[in-house]
Amino acid sequence: MAAKVIPREFTGDETTLKQRSQRIVAALSGLKITHAVGVPDNATRVIFELLEETLEIQVVSVCREGEAWAIASGLWVGGKLPVVIIQNTGLLESGDGLRGTAIEMGVPLLALMDYRGYHTLSQPNPDSAASVFEPTLRAWQLPYYFLTDYLEAQIIASAFKEACDLRRPVVVLIT
């Protein structure tokens, strides 16, 4: 069982976060995802908590985001349908794990990423993780979509289909 994540610095509406997380988990269940691999953060912790309650999706917690790509790729090779759930800073940390497994092996992975700092991009001094994130996604040639409230199922299903068609990771951004 994964350790309980204690929220820090979360300033959003907890009810809205839980409702959106429920829609995300329902969308993943609808795709028959078997495993959720990643590192919870303040925005994705509720997704992980809800996944822990489901029987059909097994949570695999990792210490570093680079491990998530390798473990998810191994699960896919073994016939499973994993999703990677990390924060944008985790993508920045995990480039070689992403390149050396998921991209090089042609693994069609759906990745959900919390976009830390997204709301600071229009400010004079944006969060540095946010300012380099989308250019990094483009550099890695990772298609990405922004998650829209109440369209979670459609966006996640579309991204999953594209990952399968392209045989590479496709990212859904949670802002």
Image (spheres, rainbow, N blue to C red):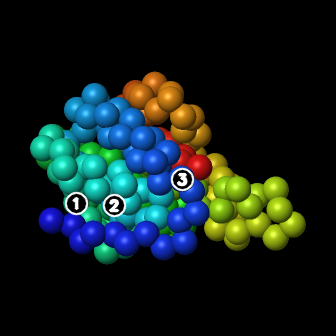
What secondary structure is marked by label 1?
A: strand
Whether pointer 2 and pointer 1 mark residues with C-beta atoms closer than 8 Å, the reply is: yes
Q: Amino acid at mark 2?
A: Gly
- For marks 2 and 1, give the CA distance: 7 Å
Whether pointer 1 and pointer 3 mark residues with C-beta atoms closer than 8 Å, the reply is: no
At 48% from the left and 58% from the top, the residue drawn is 43
Q: Amino acid at mark 3?
A: Asp
According to the image, label 1 marks what residue? 60
Q: Is residue 131 above or below residue 75?
A: below
Q: Residues within 10 Å of mark 2 (few under 14, many from 20)?
A: many
Label 1 vs 3, first from the N-terminus: 3
State the image quarter where residue 1 is shown.
bottom left
Provide residue 107's location: percent of width, then percent of height: 33, 44
- For marks 2 and 3, give the CA distance: 23 Å
27 and 96: which is toward the camera: 27
According to the image, label 2 marks what residue? 38
According to the image, label 3 marks what residue? 13
Provide residue 150's location: percent of width, then percent of height: 50, 29
Label 2 vs 3, first from the N-terminus: 3
Q: Residues within 10 Å of mark 3 (few under 14, many from 20)?
A: few
Q: Amino acid at mark 1?
A: Val
What secondary structure is marked by label 2?
A: strand
Q: Nearer the viewer, mark 1 or mark 3?
A: 3
